[in-house]
Structure formats: structure tokens, C-alpha cells
Amino acid sequence: MAANVIRHGAVSVYPGEKSGKYPDGNQVMVRGADTLVAFDTPVVANRLGSELLDADLVVLGHVHEDHMAGLHRLPHAPVHVHEADVAAAGSWDGLSRHYGYSVQVLDGMKAMIERDFHYAPRPDAVSYGDGASWDLGGGVTVRAFHTPGHTSGHCVLLIEPGGIAFIGDIDLSSFGPYYGDATSSLASFRRTLAAVPDIPAKVWITSHHKGVITERETFLTLLRAFASRLDAREEAIAQHLRQRPSTLAELVTHRFVYPPDRDELYYADAERRTIEQHLEALARDGRIVDEGGRWRSV
């Protein structure tokens, strides 16, 4: 069993290692009078006993390997996934398209997530849409708010009573938003971050890093800092191009997302997808121009 648990009404949070820092996460369980629901199943799920195994249902806020790491322990629990992410939960082919990485990277990713995240696809996963709700009994309900950007199907899950929002990988980390997959979207993430404060929540729970936040002003301060990383990355790219016109490949090698002295299987591919989206945004704003594959400042 995890070392500790944080409780808020019907919600129990089992923190992963280092406050749920990737590759771990924070396990959220919601208990109604009739139904026990698991939100995602991070690595810490593999250290839980009946508090996880008694789950009647799993609702995924989005699909990535670190949010499916305990699904293999719940083969008989129905799994519900937003319609835009459900194919990624259902098969390796679906997850491959979701990532959108190169063939060589995907081959390595499959071996890695099978080894480190107990990867088990769920072809039986059921799709839900924006506004979907679950009645857990005893007045406890869950409602989905579609918040795309990190993935196309990322959702905030709001528990009542109490206004407790599981905000998933809007994780408020100093790293900032991740939008480096094929179904990720910088533009959607910007809209999501502007809209999240309007979700009627009083408590916010992240998948990683921050865990449980109970003060609105703290949440808003962290959210502003998190969102500011989008502009910081974009400005860093623009400044680089003012000094040195570059190809996309050269920008990827320079690194604007990940530290240049660190490498993981997917870093280069995620960096490329991230930079591409910022280049598109800068070009739309008339700040840069593509001259035969080499970008320069206007």
C-alpha cells in the first residue's frame, strides 16, 4: 500500500513517488454509495491493495503510458475514455498514432512501456463525450470537462459534492505544458488554460508534481506560471531566429523543450512536434517566414 493517503470527502489521493513525478503519478479514487471509481492508474497503482482492486470502474482523464500502468490489475473493471483518446487506449496501433513518433522510436517505446508501465491495451474501452457524467450513488457524481491540448481527449473530471477537480496533466509543473504528440495541440492548450479557471472547482488535484491544491489563489498563481511557459518557449524560438535563421532540424538539435544534455527515446520527436507548432503560430502572426525550409525572423 502507498505510504499515505489524502482524503477530501469522497475522494482519496494516493501520492506516487516524488509527489507523482513522471514516471509515477498520483492515484485518485472516488467512492460513492454504489460505485468505487479509479481516475487513471499510474505506477503507484501497482503498490495498492483493495483500495484499488475493489474499483468498479476506471475513468481515464486521458491516454498516455503513465496513466495506464495499473490497468493490468483491473481486467474486469470497465474502462471509460474520452472519444478522442479511446482508440489510443484500445490497441498499440491506436497508441502509436496517438504518439505519432517515428517507427524507430515507437519500437523502443513499445518495449519500454511494456517493461516499465505494464502496458496492457483495453480494446473493450468505452468512449464518453464532453459533459458526460457518472452517478456513483449517495449524491456523489463525476462530470467530464473536455480540455484538449495535452492530448486531443484530455479531460478534467469534477467530483461533487465539494467541487473537487482532477485536472490530470494540466500538472502546474515548472516544466510547463507538454504538447509533443501527434494529437497534442498548442492552440487547444492555450484555449484550455484560459477556460480551466471557469470550471466550478474548490479543490484541484494534478496527476503529477503538485498533488492537492486547496486555495484558489494558489491554483491561479500556479496556472499562470504554467501557461507562461508557452510564451517563453515561443519567444525563445523567435529570438533564436532573429540571431540565426534555422531549419526545423537545426532548431530540434538546439532544444527549446528538453535540456540539451539529457536524452530519452522520444525527446527529439516531441521536440520537433512542439517546435513545429510554435513555428506555425509565429508565422501566422507574421513574425517569421519560411524561406525554402529555413526559418528567419521578419
Image: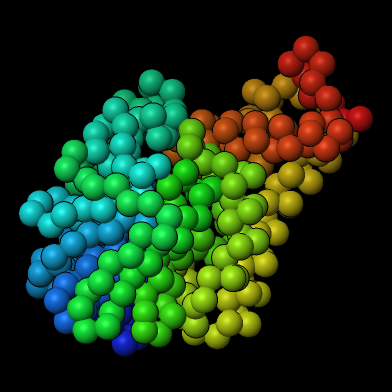
In the image, 97 versus 247, the foreground residue is: 97
Q: Residue at (49%, 82%) from the top-left corner?
A: 202
Q: Is residue 186 above or below residue 61?
A: above
Q: Is residue 253 left or right of residue 207?
A: right
In the image, 188 versus 247, the foreground residue is: 188
In the image, 16 versus 57, the foreground residue is: 57
Q: Residue at (59%, 70%) from the top-left corner?
A: 198
User: In which quarter of the view is residue 265 placed?
Assistant: top left
Q: Is residue 129 above or below residue 5?
A: above
Name the image quarter holding the N terminus. bottom left
Q: Is residue 26 left or right of residue 31?
A: right
Q: Position of residue 49 (x, y in %)?
A: 11, 70
Q: Is residue 105 above or below residue 143?
A: above
User: In which quarter of the view is residue 76 placed?
Assistant: bottom left
Q: Is residue 124 left or right of residue 163?
A: left
- In this view, the residue farthest toward the right is 298
Q: Position of residue 94 (x, y in %)?
A: 31, 32
Q: Residue at (32%, 38%) from the top-left corner?
A: 88
Q: Is residue 111 visible?
A: no
Q: Position of residue 207 (x, y in %)?
A: 40, 64
Q: Position of residue 66 (x, y in %)?
A: 33, 51
Q: Is residue 171 visible?
A: yes
Q: Residue at (82%, 16%) from the top-left corner?
A: 291
In the image, 167 versus 18, the foreground residue is: 167
Asked which colour scheme the image uses, the reply is rainbow
User: In which quarter of the view is residue 59 placed?
Assistant: bottom left
Name the image quarter holding the C terminus. top right
